[in-house]
Image: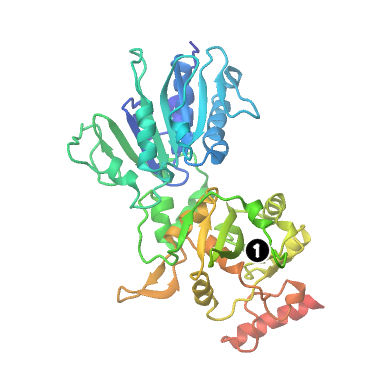
Amino acid sequence: MNTVVLDDLALYGKEYRRYVDCKKRYRIVKGSIASKKSMNTARNMIERLLTYPNANLICFRKYEALLRSSCRAELVKAIYAMGVQDLFKIPRGDMTITVKNTGQVILFRGCMDTMNLSSITVERGYLCWAWIEEMYEISEEDFNRIDDRLRGQLPPELFYQITGTFNPWHEMSWTKKRFFELGEGDTEDGEIPYKPGRQLSTSLLLAITRNYYHNEFLDQQFLERMERMRIQEPNRYRIAGEGEWGTSGDTIYADWRIEEFDFRSLFYERDYHTNKPLWNIRHGLDFGWSDQTAGVMLLEGELNGKRTIYICEEYFEVRQSRDDIANRLKEMGWDQYRIHADSENPELIDALKKAGLPRIFGVRKAPGSVYSGIAKLRDYQIIIHPTCTQFAISIAHYAWKTGLDGKPTMTPLHDFSHLMDAMRYAFIDEEVGIAATAHYAPPGITGVATTNRALYEQRLNYARRKKR
């Protein structure tokens, strides 16, 4: 048996002691960003494997392609943070992680193929623990298949357990009723007080909610950013900040779905008669300043006679410098295409052009363009690739503001708007203002019809100085 002495407070921080010690059948934690749920789960799994030499772990996510950058990355990070990297074999190619002296394994499987949930075995010991990351992505049927797989007699020291971690995407998720509400025949065991939708404890289950303010390791800049979100984007803050369930409300886009597709095969499809591409590729970029910088690559065309948008790739980062943005977009290959960008910061656009994005330009924002752009996009069905998780969350919560009469207005909420704005910009082909050819006209120059004449004159003079 490997013996590793760990300082639990330094390893997990506060508010996770009960979760770490839990040996019930189901251990579920929903939470906000930076709530430590995935980090602490990964560290706990590594500690357990080194404590129980006959135990093995399997990690699930709906889409197998996302496991390397989520569960596996967290587990590898935990191994190095705990200083036990010499005890593990971590191959670059194969996903499987192995404990060297015992042969224990950490396996990774997606849930798209039902065979992945039934034909799983290990050479040594027992497959007794499962970790489902972003559990809201899978169906309750998928969960039941995983649950059925963990069965059979175990040695006295081992126990079966499914750990589920996820962000509370939507209150209609099956996970809310299944794990955070008392069902018929369920009885509290008194370990923690029952709070509907937030926490529940029974003989088989521990379900808790954790937030970023349960994380004592955060820096001051992050805390300030969350405070800005609390004030400026209260609906987003409820979910991303407090870990509460998302609500339906008056959402703007209804005709959308998440679906696997091959972007490259679509990109090269051509009309049989004209040899013209069937799909137009577009890129949109929204600058979030102290908030998120968001971008989207999409294909636009027709599918079975219906206007269709395929969301192929997303860019969603926080606190990005000019170099960060430029380098990442070049890595993604966006420097080869026209990027339809937010025109509110012409100097940033100019800097990005010089940094290797020669075809980026600021889009023209005419009065009423937000509503008209949304109206145009509502005529499309939107198909989202499973890897575009932030886009899926955003579109599910992007909603109209409510007026004093309680009815929706024609103005969208700022919450969850960044990727939605990026998609809208991708369809605006007009460049901003009188300095369009130089791509660095300041925001708002749309002609002398500007409602604020003084502001127009100020921006006009700025543009003239830049053109000299």
Q: Is residue 281 visible?
A: no
The residue located at (48%, 17%) in the rendering is 50
Residue 125 sits in which quadrant?
Answer: top left
Horizontal and vertical percent position of residue 288: 57, 61
The residue located at (31%, 27%) in the rendering is 24
Q: Is residue 139 visible?
A: yes
Q: How many discs mark residues in the rendered view?
A: 1
**Relative to 79, does residue 100 appear above or below in the rendering?**
above
Q: Is residue 110 left or right of residue 450?
A: left
Residue at the extreme right of the image, as rendered: 468
Horizontal and vertical percent position of residue 93: 65, 30
Identity of the amino acid at label 1? Leu
Q: Nearer the viewer, residue 63 or 189?
A: 63
The residue located at (64%, 84%) in the rendering is 456
**Relative to 135, does residue 347 appear above or below in the rendering?**
below
Q: Is residue 341 left or right of residue 169?
A: right
- Quadrant location of the C terminus in the rendered image: bottom right
Horizontal and vertical percent position of residue 181: 25, 44
Q: Which residue is mark 1?
A: 278
Q: Is residue 44 left or right of residue 205?
A: right
Q: Nearer the viewer, residue 275 or 395?
A: 275
Q: Secondary structure at mark 1?
A: loop
Horizontal and vertical percent position of residue 191: 24, 31
Q: Nearer the viewer, residue 326 or 110?
A: 110
> For the residue carrying disc 1, how many other residues have a C-alpha within 10 Å: few (<14), some (14-19), or many (20+)?
some
